[in-house]
Image (cartoon, helix red, strand yellow):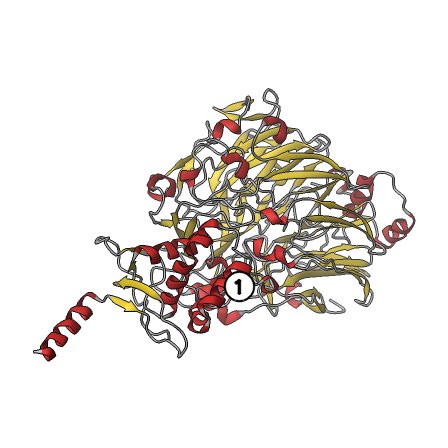
Amino acid sequence: MRKSISAAIALSISATMIMLTSGPASADQPPGVYTVKDGNKVDDKTLEGWKTWRAMACERCHGPEQEGLVGPSLVNSLKTLSKDDFHATIQNGRPEKGMPNFGGVALVQKNWENLYNYLKGRSDGKIAPGHLYPVSQADAPPPPAGWNKPKS
Amino acid sequence: MRYEFRSILVRGAVLAAAAATSTSALADADLDSKISDSSNWAAQAGDYANHRYSTLNQVNASNVGKLQVAWTMSTGVLRGHEGSPLVIGDTMFIHTPFPNNVYAINLKDQTYKWKYEPKQDADVVPVMCCDTVNRGLAYGDGKIFLQQADTTLVALDAKSGKVVWTAKNGNPKIGETNTNAPHVFKDKVLTGISGGEFGVRGRVVAYDIKTGKQVWKGYSTGPDAEMLMDPAKTMTWTNGKMAPVGKDSSLKSWQGEQWKLGGGTTWGWYAYDPKLNLVYYGSGNPSTWNPAQRPGDNKWSMTIWARDLDTGVAKWVYQMTPHDEWDFDGVNEMILADVNKGGKAVPALVHFDRNGFGYTMNRQTGELLVAEKYDPQVNWATKVDMKTGRPIVDKKFSPGTTGPDVNVKDICPAALGSKDQQPSSYDPKSGLFFVPTNHVCMTYEPFQVEYTAGQPYVGATLTMFPTPNSHGGMGNFIAWDAAQGKIVWSKAEKFSVWSGALTTAGDVIFYGTLEGYIKAVSTKDGKELWKFKTPSGIIGNVFTYSYGSKQYVGVYSGIGGWAGIGMAAGLTESTAGLGAVGGYKDLAKYTTLGGSLFVFSLPEGT
């Protein structure tokens, strides 16, 4: 009985692809907190995190897929950067490396944790790059094809 | 245009002697005489008219294939190298991207005569939207002028490198920076401002060349007095003729106080007509990139301006892209040339705009003569209505129509335009214009943003890709007939041609490519005659000079700018639907960052 219930639960999870925690985490890295469905539909808080990323034009330095440009890859950084260090970096910037501080921006003050969770989801390979949609939006387009395939 | 000075060819040695003893009271006479000596390259465009043309013809179409490296030099700095050095007599003046070092080089042995290495706050770098470029120095009245990224305008004694005066031109804390070259016209130094992505209010400022005191400042948006507009006398093309702009022409075209964050920045290449005493330049995008937040035509962003040099008062204006929805900054170079229209020579202004249209204006009156696509695949507008002067927008490619949070696909050209700041060149022999272009399209999705001083105030996400259903490359180098508005010949390029062109009396055009090639092509048909691979991609402007009876051709090598390494690095991981395929991925195979100057000449005995 227990076995079949577990199997049923496992099947229903894989069918809808809802994940509640981040994937691979290093020993002392707590998981990001986000809900993602079909790669690009996320909970409201994570959506606000993505919108904060978008509004601050972070892609100008970190790339449209957080893969790095003149600034480092956040897909890599978020594997090891602690949440506190992330907060400090956003607040203070890294002036010697050309990153401004966002401490004075109301949107960032309000949403930095959501931004952290969004970026963690990107780093974990669970959230697709590009436009995100609310979990409830049934007619949202699919994420970019091949987004979660390993890069050759 | 070099008017009556064009026919004077003064020997370099004589000029050098004259410069040593010259105490010319008229600033314009100093630069005029330097420009009239074809052995110099005394202004960024070689002259006041943005021709980028040299009468030197030792290098010509028959022998350019033998061109070889004469000497080279590191600039000591990485990232995008725009603009070019200046050459006056036996001295070359080199500038660099941030931190904007200036070096005076002895052409005899390439040793440094002096160095100016400014101390600038590193906080400036994050508020430069599109790489840490600097478009170069200006010369006049015995001084070298540097427009620093932190908005400080500096006048250096050309012989000693000592600071003569400085002027504070803006405030980086509110997102204001500078990338443009200053321009010396008569007794004034003109400069602009950058920051259209930071809610900066654009303007052009004229400083006294001797003292650095501000003489006038003309804003691009806002009250008439601040724009130096006369409602009854400043004219604009209206229903087939020139008419006054009227009272509050800018204020009436914005909602509320959005004009204060209005953009209309001024970081391009200016021109000057000494006979008309008019300065010509273009203003950039209105702020934000989300059109829903700024209903109205958003005057006078995206505008060609003609201002009186002495007072700054606007004589005429013409807005090319009312209520912009694509970031088609109007700042590209204004070229002054006579164009044969209706059987007579019209004093014209020719401008290749980001929006993909090549404009020919009567530069005296401001009348619109020609507005035609210089890339046939431009699609955001079907054409320009020649009576109203307004583009006929195709709603299929209009992000403002579909509104925030809707992605509009396959808009051509991309935001970086059919041409960005990379300047074109004019050939007086053929009357043609030679234009380095981009062949790139985009998706564009606007969204709501709030303004915080000193923070990005953009409000759109874009992806860019080579123009579909074409040759697959991302650039063309073209020859343009500005009287008819027609492409005469077109040479496809793998990547956007992001460098400035130079045309010479030897019937050769030079330009650089993003892979790092400097190329020579024939003025007749664009056929490639010579090329050389420099260490890094080229986004600078090719220049030429002569020294010791030898002609030299030079260019900076150092990729960057908006099209450069950012695209290469960002778009190597191809993800369908986001970012590029093919072309941009390849760019990373050819180049990475660099910073050097290459100078070429013919071998001995050629």
Q: Chain of mark 1?
A: B
Quarter holding residue B120: bottom right
Q: In this view of the protein, can residue B8 be seen by the observer?
A: no
Inspect the image, locate mark 1, and give the three-letter code of the amino acid beneath it: Ile
Left or right: residue A22 compared with residue A3: right
Which of these two is toward me, A72 or B341? A72
Foreground of the two, B291 or B274: B291
Residue at 32%, 67% in the rendered image:
A147
Q: Quadrant of the N terminus of chain B?
A: top right
Q: Residue at x 55, y 28 (%)?
A: B367
Determine the residue located farthest toward the left in the rendered image. A1
Q: Which residue is mark 1?
A: B565
Residue at point 48%, 31% (across, down)? B254
Residue nearer the viewer, B71 or B270? B270
| Side of B32 where B247 appears, left or right | left
**Position of residue A59 measured from the top left corner of the image (x, y, whole percent):** 46, 59
Work out whether B343 lies above or below B209.
above
- Quadrant holding the C terminus of chain B: bottom right
Q: Residue furthest top?
A: B232
Where's residue A83, x and y in %? 44, 67
Q: Classify residue B385 by image quadrant.
A: top left
Residue B70, relative to residue B324: is it above or below?
below
Question: What residue appears at the point 51 percent right and 38 percent down from the top-left corner?
Answer: B484
Q: Is residue B604 left or right of residue A48?
A: right
